[in-house]
Image (cartoon, helix red, strand yellow):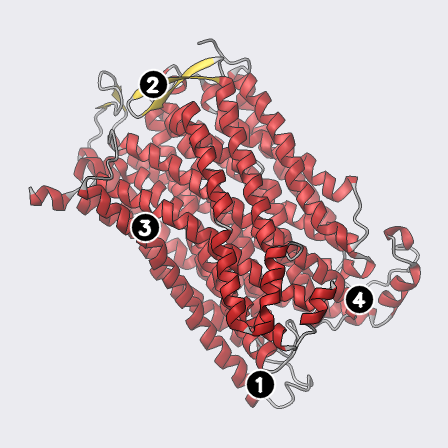
Amino acid sequence: MGAAILPDLGTEILIPICAIIGIAFSLVQWVLVSRVKLSPTRDSPSNSGGKNGYSDYLIEEEEGINDHNVVTKCAEIQSAISEGATSFLFTEYQYVGVFMVIFAILIFLFLGSVEGFSTKSQPCTYDHSKTCKPALATAVFSTVSFLLGGITSVVSGFLGMKIATYANARTTLEARKGVGKAFIVAFRSGAVMGFLLAANGLLVLYIAINLFKLYYGDDWGGLFEAITGYGLGGSSMALFGRVGGGIYTKAADVGADLVGKVERNIPEDDPRNPAVIADNVGDNVGDIAGMGSDLFGSYAESSCAALVVASISSFGINHELTPMLYPLLISSVGIIVCLITTLFATDFFEIKAVKEIEPSLKRQLIISTVLMTVGIAIVSWIALPHSFTIFNFGSQKVVKNWELFLCVAVGLWAGLIIGFITEYYTSNAYSPVQDVADSCRTGAATNVIFGLALGYKSVIIPIFAIAISIFVSFSFAAMYGIAVAALGMLSTIATGLAIDAYGPISDNAGGIAEMAGMSHRIRERTDALDAAGNTTAAIGKGFAIGSAALVSLALFGAFVSRAAISTVDVLTPKVFIGLLVGAMLPYWFSAMTMKSVGSAALKMVEEVRRQFNTIPGLMEGTVKPDYATCVKISTDASIKEMIPPGALVMLTPLIVGIFFGVETLSGVLAGSLVSGVQIAISASNTGGAWDNAKKYIEAGASDHARTLGPKGSDPHKAAVIGDTVGDPLKDTSGPSLNILIKLMAVESLVFAPFFATHGGLLFKIWH
């Protein structure tokens, strides 16, 4: 079998050092962003002169007129957005905190009751000849790791939101000096979030493993089973962040669009629109705080799934630390790779023109994937023995280190393929979105038909990519192969999140420019940043969904092993009813989230109409609207509406496991995975395509687009309706579904010992 080249001490030093480098790098980026001042200081035009590829006269004109005024206005708007976002998150976290405490108690009671709360050592799950720590220990440590995962997830989301609301006005002000400067500020701020999240997740997990080891000693199976709570904590917070944030952002967005753009015919981010601040707050709480928690959850769960399977393979049985921590080493190298990649966007190349923005963001994905492939090869070579065995449903399978390298690489490249296919279907540079825009000639109905068709079609290639990566990784290394393929897809998470957070930051920057009354030229620059951000946000969602599918399957495998089910037979009625119900759950969940957005948007529309009708001087712009009421409506609606879908996801595995047993639950997990992935991809891409079709008409950059425009024309109105329908699909239902898939699987894995011992009450009574 042989040993790994990298000594255990090297691993123990390498992982925390990479995490600390990631945190340090994000702080450096934050300092660079904070150099853009939000207080009105006069820049003499010569400092920021023609080196940006913009002639001096332009800067003089932009900075000379009402300079103090503009900066002060930007600062005011930014603080309003920041306050709204902070107050929403605090309200949300109070509710989520109560849920965390209740759920932590549940974990403790259920897992503790497996052996009747006894403190005696028990025979090990997979090897009855040895004794392991009592079930009570698993209960205590699972509860602790659940709380750790939840807190890390909440902190990651909150910090991401803070930096985004800090950077939006700074991006607007930099846009006065040229599109390149603005791009760098927006991208750096995204990088702060990406690196903080990736490094924090890794560091907390690493510290938790080392602390738990003090108690567990040689019982690695028990240790890593207890660590799975970390993934559950991360994802359950992400569920509420994603659903609550998604409902918030879309209620505000739909309300602002319907009354402002369609009825009153005022621009999207017009300061006269009362819902405009709520709309900008929504971008931060949904797309940044929610997205951050979501990807952190995926990362935590794929690491946990890989560690659980490894702990009952030769690594865990022979106590080989370096190969055991191979999943964490991949993430550590990922941080370093993403750090180098980020420099390509901010330091090595300077963006001078609008058309360079999107290629630069796409270059990030390609560079990080290529570098990461090399990184994985090195890690696989030094951290794994030449051959070893992996647990495979009751037997051990011999695997070589190069086979494991291929598993990780296939996940990594499948992620890139999914990203580019998503881009092809959602970017207005390609024919699918241009066709959707063209269909607006004949009204909103044809736009909706074309958009739905595009969404369904966009599922085909990503599903093949996921299917091939599952087949390859399972053939080489069983369930462990799938878990590390998911980690491969998430190994460049820092870059993925930076690109993702860049979108909402530029979107906010555009809104602030409009509200501060900046010139048309600056709006064009922020719009260009935003259009590129829209496409990259869709790519980020593609990544999140693809990785969720792999993570969920890996967790499913770990659950089946832990619950001691040898095969899942679809033909037995117990399993088949589970499959049917599982496949229905994503529809039920989507129905709840879509309806929530609809009812919250209804309240918002009524409030915006009321203000336009009753506040004299609002349309003339002489009086300020009441922004605070709109922020409150969005907050209250989203908090109230996020509870039912959240409860559906969290209670399903518990109810099915307790009353119907582990076999039916395995059917439910398989069904929800299979249908959830399809709906999530089509919903996200349909919404993204409608949004960019509208932007394509508005920008009027090509002859074709000009025949459909300008703003206010009939095709444009049809496009706005499509965009409004697509909003809750792409920002609430679609992205929340990937959490549904993962969360049910990880929850089943955490509660597996309880279900295996006490589950299936109804079938026990039946017999």
Numbered circle sitting on residue 396: 2
Q: Residue at x 69, y 34 (%)?
A: 340
Determine whether the residue tagged by mark 3 lies in a helix, strand or loop: helix
**Mark 1 sits on what residue?**
612
Disc 3, disc 1: CB below 8 Å? Answer: no
What is the CA distance from the residue labelled 2 to the residue labelled 1?
Answer: 70 Å
Q: Nearer the viewer, residue 179 or 730?
A: 730
Task: Name the amino acid type tagged 2.
Answer: Gln
What is the CA distance from the residue labelled 3 to the residue labelled 1?
Answer: 45 Å
> Callout 3: few (<14), some (14-19), or many (20+) C-alpha neighbours within 10 Å?
many
Numbered circle sitting on residue 521: 4
What is the CA distance from the residue labelled 3 to the residue labelled 4?
Answer: 50 Å
Disc 3, disc 4: CB below 8 Å? Answer: no
Disc 1, disc 4: CB below 8 Å? Answer: no
Task: Name the amino acid type tagged 3.
Answer: Ala
Q: Residue at x 48, y 51 (%)?
A: 681
What is the CA distance from the residue labelled 1 to the residue labelled 4?
Answer: 29 Å
